[in-house]
Image (cartoon, rainbow, N blue to C red):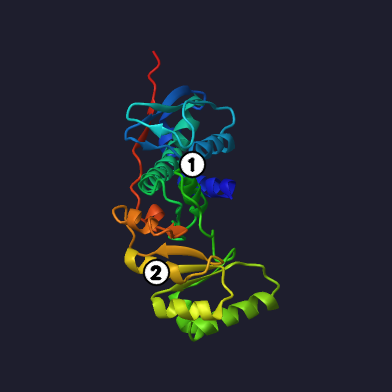
Amino acid sequence: MLDEIIQFALREDIGEGDHSTLACVPKNATGVAKLLVKENGILAGVEVAKRIYELYDPSLDVEYYKKDGDAIEIGEIVLQVKGSSQSILSTERLVLNFMQRMSGIASQTARIVKEIEGCSTKLLDTRKTTPGIRYLEKMAVKIGGGENHRFGLYDMVMLKDNHNDYAGGITAAIQKTKHYLAENNKDLRIEIEVRNMEELNEVLQVGGVQRIMLDNFTPAQLSEALKLIPREYETEASGGITLETIRSYAETGVQFISVGALTHSVKSLDLSLKAVFQS
């Protein structure tokens, strides 16, 4: 999947040719460039950059001074690349776009993980990702210290409010899902979303799921709900949870907290690739 993402991105960016570079940089010219840190944070995307260079021009000589997951500070050098000046220029923006986006996600994830340090709760991402690069964004969450929820619609059943409403209610949604999985010989875990205590009690009566998501509960409501849920069920809190409030949710003892903001509204970390002047 990584190679497919990179190859598509190269086609998208370069098309029939990088005319800016082809117009003014000789084919046999060589150069050196350094990737510089311009904002403090957590680095992510080094392995992706490595693969971009390998796929585009294996002759490039790249020296890495930092690795994924490292804390980085303004002025530090992440990597140095030597070789074809044309190749360095043609891959510059793709390397930066991926590394800046991934580092922003990893940095945000690390901040939130630190906020719930000492609690048993695990921080999860969601499917609120950028279409086409979900693999990279979820990789960045892991680098930042978080955990991945389901990757897509195919690797776990997640019955949310709309599923339940369209199915005719929670009981019908669970029963239909269990029948579907059995009929199609699918061994998938089932998670179901509940919006209030009434829906929670209905889920507990029906059973047959592995995880219960408590959506838009306050920490106090969550604490009360957790008292009713047997240990056989995994528990997840979601909905409107921020950096400022997440600690109070984690202290309830809920097993997972999912935060869409890890990937859907993150500011990229500022990095820059600069040519090294050679006299």
Residue 163, percent from left and from top: 48, 78
| The C terminus, quarter of image | top left
Density class for disc 1 (Cα within 10 Å; few <14, some 14-19, many ≥20) is few
Residue 159, percent from left and from top: 50, 73
State the residue at coordinates (46%, 58%).
256
Residue 68, percent from left and from top: 48, 36
**Total number of numbered labels?**
2
The residue under label 1 is 17
**In which quadrant of the rendered view does residue 199 lie?**
bottom left
State the residue at coordinates (58%, 27%).
59
State the residue at coordinates (40%, 16%).
278
**Which residue ends up furthest to the front in the rendered image?**
227
The residue under label 2 is 215
Kind of residue indicated by mark 2: Asp
N-terminal label among 1 and 2: 1
State the residue at coordinates (46%, 50%).
137
**In which quadrant of the rendered view does residue 215 lie?**
bottom left
- Which element carries disc 2, helix, strand or loop? strand
